[in-house]
């Protein structure tokens, strides 16, 4: 009887099922206490330090540098510029002229 009471005292509470994994209450999420504040207020006085460290990491770490290069390469600048691959050169020129209007 004493053993049963001891086991009940130290029994883990069952986590409730949730539609979202991050809304669950499993043991892996016990110490995850995210901030409720807006991102700008969280950065506050630390913005300069964070920016300097990020730039330093890009300079010294090839993985970080590659991430920045990939983001820049995949960004759409002034928009998508379609280009016809039609076999007929005359048709291709007329389609291109219509797209560039």
Image: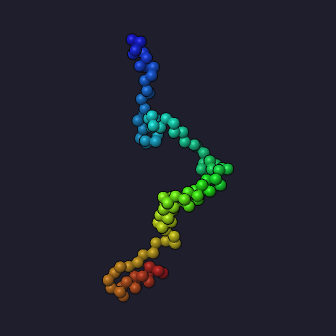
Residue lying at the far right in this picture: please name it: 45
Q: Position of residue 21 (x, y in %)?
A: 43, 41
Quarter holding residue 93: bottom left
Residue 71 visible (yes or no):
no
Report the residue at 37% width, 83% height from top.
92
Q: Position of residue 31 (x, y in %)?
A: 51, 36
Please say if 52 is above or below 4.
Answer: below
| Residue 67 shown left or right of residue 51 in the figure | left
> Quarter-wise, where is residue 8 in the image?
top left
Give how far across and how far down residue 82 sits, in percent: 42, 75
Decide if residue 87 is on the left or right side of residue 44: left
Please report the residue visible at 54 percent of the width from the left and 39 percent of the height from the top: 33
Vertical position of residue 16 compared to residue 87: above or below: above
Measuring 45% from the left and 20% from the top, which residue is drawn there?
9
Which residue is farthest front? 60
Q: Residue 78 appears at what percent x and percent y?
A: 52, 72
Tell me if 42 is positioned left or right of 65 in this view: right
Q: Is residue 96 above or below residue 39?
A: below
Q: Using the image as rendered, state which of residue 47 and residue 62 is in the foreground.
A: 62
Q: How many marks?
A: 0
Q: Residue furthest top?
A: 1
User: Looking at the rendering, in which quadrant would you find the N terminus?
Assistant: top left
> Which residue appears at 44% of the width and 79% of the height?
99
Q: Can you see residue 85?
A: yes
Residue 87 vs residue 11, the one in the foreground: 11
Residue at the left extreme of this rendering: 87
The type of colouring in the image is rainbow
């Amino acid at each position: 009887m004493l053993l049963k009471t001891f086991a009940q005292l130290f029994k883990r509470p069952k986590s409730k099922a949730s539609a979202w994994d991050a809304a669950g209450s499993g043991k892996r999420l016990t110490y995850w206490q995210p901030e409720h504040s807006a991102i700008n207020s969280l950065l506050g006085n630390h913005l300069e330090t964070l920016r300097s460290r990020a730039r330093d990491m890009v300079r010294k770490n090839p993985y970080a540098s590659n991430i920045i290069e990939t983001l820049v390469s995949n960004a759409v600048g002034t928009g998508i510029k379609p280009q016809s691959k039609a076999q007929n050169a005359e048709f291709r020129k007329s389609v291109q002229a219509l797209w560039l209007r």
